[in-house]
Amino acid sequence: MNASRVLDGPRLDRNGNVRLSLESDFADVYETVMSVRHDYIVEAPCLRVWVTFRQRWAGGGFPAFLKEPKLTIGFAAAFETVELYDAADSVQLSADLTALRNPAKHTLQLRPQTRARVRFLPADVHLIACAADQHSVLPSGAVKRYGTRKLWVGSGRGLDGWAEAANGRQIFEQTNTKPYCLQGPNGTLSRNWEIAKRDEAPASVMLHGWEGGYGLPDCLACARAFGASGESWTAYLCVALATGWRL
Amino acid sequence: MASFAPTDGGFVLQNDAGEFTVYTALFQAGGKVAGPGYVARWAGPDGQLLVDGLEAGFVSANDPEIGGIGIPAWHHFRANGEATSGIEAGRSTRCAAPPAE
């Protein structure tokens, strides 16, 4: 991260919600390659945030590639159980997290493609994650209209759209690319969510735009060329306790 | 009801779910560090610390030790013309929000 700025707020809007927008720039050893924008709406029962990745590599220097773009949510609280719901509030998966104690040996994959909400117990923490269309932004930096939300997988929007675009882009190299690297249809990129946990706590949820194996050197065929400078992709998150969540 | 207040290095956003801290720049305190933009700390209405993103050093976004809500991350590569023999120092850089590498 090499620069950051507040674009709007914090301020109370006419509905009594807090608005705050910020942007951070990320650089490698050569130049700035990505800006990430967080646009918050804090309502009484929940915190909602749209996160937008904007690619900024303009073609200079050595070709740039990226693998496994994602949003991570890391919790300090001790969770014992996880439930996964679809957008219609039907349970897709329930799992005991107490046996998940070493992320190097075992993580939990959340694969149902209809997934929309994760519930952690006993704290009753809810996390909603969606793909989203891009905002309409005023010249001042404030958001004029927030991006419409769609399912994380299959909508062709948000990070799902980024993965679809990346499927057709130049591959970095084929090294360390075993069959598990490309789990999508016909050997394409896949985007499961993943829960990692150590001992009783902490735990994290990784919301993958697309997956890339076990770490930096693994699955290098999942590293794909950057898109055009300015290309951007948005995800939506909502966090709440108990019944405060909303899609 | 939602509200906000300034705090050292950023803002605290408050609602019925508790207090969420967002830093506006790389924040360092007591030898620990958190990145800007994402929620680096969440304390529930009963004071329970649900998210604690002030880290003692660089933590990968793949590691559950990381704390935060909406931490952006990816693995980053530059093709510098070397033989395709894996990752070598200087050819790849991991990008993640907290902290600068």
Image: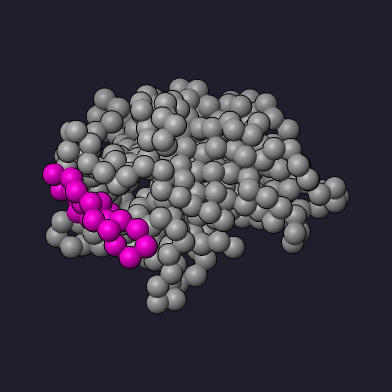
Residue found at x 37% / y 62%: B9
Residue found at x 54% / y 43%: A35
Q: How is the image coloured?
A: one colour
User: Where's residue A74, x and y in %?
Assistant: 38, 55
User: Where's residue A188, x and y in %?
Assistant: 62, 30
In the picture, which quadrant includes the C terminus of chain A? top left
Please identify the dominant SS of the magenta region: strand
Q: Is residue A105 found left or right of B52 in the rendered image?
A: right
Q: Is residue B66 found left or right of A97 in the rendered image?
A: right
Q: Which residues are magenta?
A: B1-20
Does residue A121 sit above or below A55 in this rendering? below
Q: Is residue A203 found left or right of B86 in the rendered image?
A: left
Q: Nearer the viewer, residue B7 or A118?
A: B7
Residue found at x 23% / y 36%: A13
Residue A99 appears in view: no
Residue B73 appears in view: yes
